[in-house]
């Protein structure tokens, strides 16, 4: 089989490399992509076939790995594709089902873990009638494929529930530190954390780094999680607020990284 990758960001390039190690041909399209994307794809050994149209012509399977806010647009760009379309983005079950309605053959996916550069670090959850076919592509690779069910949306539900805690709690930690700072008790809160919850300071620093480097991607993910909660009859406000925290976070280009700098930027943005 040939897999077409849409589009090789940090995660996508690593997933593509995992497929190449299995002997699977992986193609991508450089047209309208950034130099950074081209560099990642080249380093991973992916074959550039120029355009998305050519990718969809060559591929038996299309694998979409993009920021969640672009998932529907990416799917629409390959309308008419008759192979297996795998959406492995951080989207809600309802968004996954909406994309499934556009594709004659659809597999829902959700990646949990870092870009798979080592074994036993990252899982690709899959659901849909042809999930087993997609899982077989990764058999024995450093990316573990796990089939959830044959229902499109189920794999996305796993991803949404998992990230609701991991990324949602990172936003809450930053917000807690910011509200303490706004009330002039930031140092007192940090001192209390060091006494009663010593692990929290490291988590806060990690949350700040992630907000700076990945927060722009996580805004859409938090909104998709909010929609997932709402569809389940649960409060969506947790993750709408988390989206706002990540929206306010400074971007990496700003040269801000320390937790106190990120907290200051959150307050200033408000």
Image: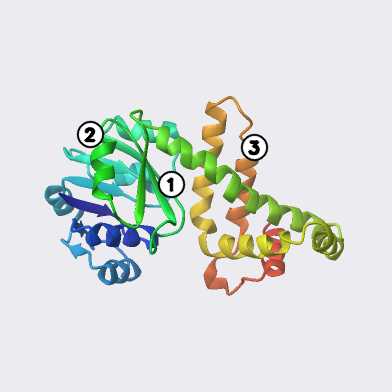
- Quadrant, the C terminus: bottom right
Estimate the spatial distance between the alpha carbons at disc 1 and disc 2, rounded to whole Å.
22 Å
Q: State the image coordinates of residue 233 (x, y, percent, origin top left).
A: 59, 24
Q: Residue at coordinates 72% horizontally, 63% vertically from top-left?
A: 201
Estimate the spatial distance between the alpha carbons at disc 3 and disc 1, rounded to whole Å.
19 Å
Side of 139 where 210 appears, left or right: right
Estimate the spatial distance between the alpha carbons at disc 2 and disc 3, rounded to whole Å.
34 Å
Direction bottom: furthest residue: 255
Residue 69 badge: 1
Badge 1 element: helix
How has the structure been colored for display? rainbow
Q: Residue at coordinates 22% horizontally, 34% vertically from top-left?
A: 105
Residue under numbered circle 2: 105
Q: Nearer the viewer, residue 202 or 58?
A: 202
- Between circles 2 and 3, the one closer to the viewer is 2
Residue 237 badge: 3
For label 1, count other residues whose C-alpha is less than 10 Å away and answer few (under 14), some (14-19) or many (20+).
some
Upstream in sequence: badge 1 or badge 2: 1
Q: State the image coordinates of residue 124 (x, y, percent, origin top left).
A: 38, 47
């Amino acid at each position: 089989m040939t897999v077409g990758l849409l589009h090789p960001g940090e995660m996508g390039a690593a997933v593509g490399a995992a497929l190449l190690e299995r002997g699977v041909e992986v193609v991508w399209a450089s047209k309208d992509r950034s130099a950074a994307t081209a560099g990642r794809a080249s380093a991973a050994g992916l074959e550039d076939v120029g355009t998305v149209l050519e990718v969809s012509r060559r591929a038996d399977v299309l694998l979409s790995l993009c920021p969640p806010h672009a998932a529907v647009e990416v799917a629409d760009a390959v309308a008419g594709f008759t192979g297996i379309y795998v959406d492995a983005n951080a989207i809600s079950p309802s968004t996954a089902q909406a994309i499934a309605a556009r594709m004659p053959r659809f597999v829902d996916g959700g990646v949990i873990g870092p870009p798979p550069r080592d074994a036993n670090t990252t899982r690709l959850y899959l659901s849909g009638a042809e999930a087993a076919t997609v899982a077989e592509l990764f058999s024995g690779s450093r990316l573990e494929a796990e089939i959830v069910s044959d229902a499109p949306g189920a794999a996305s539900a796993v991803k949404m529930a998992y990230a609701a805690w991991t990324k949602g709690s990172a936003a809450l930690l930053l917000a807690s530190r910011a509200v303490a700072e706004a009330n002039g008790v930031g140092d007192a809160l940090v001192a209390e954390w060091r006494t009663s919850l010593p692990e929290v300071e490291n988590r806060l620093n990690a949350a700040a780094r992630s907000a700076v480097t990945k927060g722009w991607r996580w805004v859409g993910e938090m909104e998709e999680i909010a929609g997932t909660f709402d569809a389940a009859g649960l409060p969506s406000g947790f993750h709408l607020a988390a989206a706002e925290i990540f929206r306010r976070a400074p971007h990496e280009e700003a040269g801000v990284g320390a937790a106190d700098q990120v907290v200051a930027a959150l307050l200033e943005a408000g």
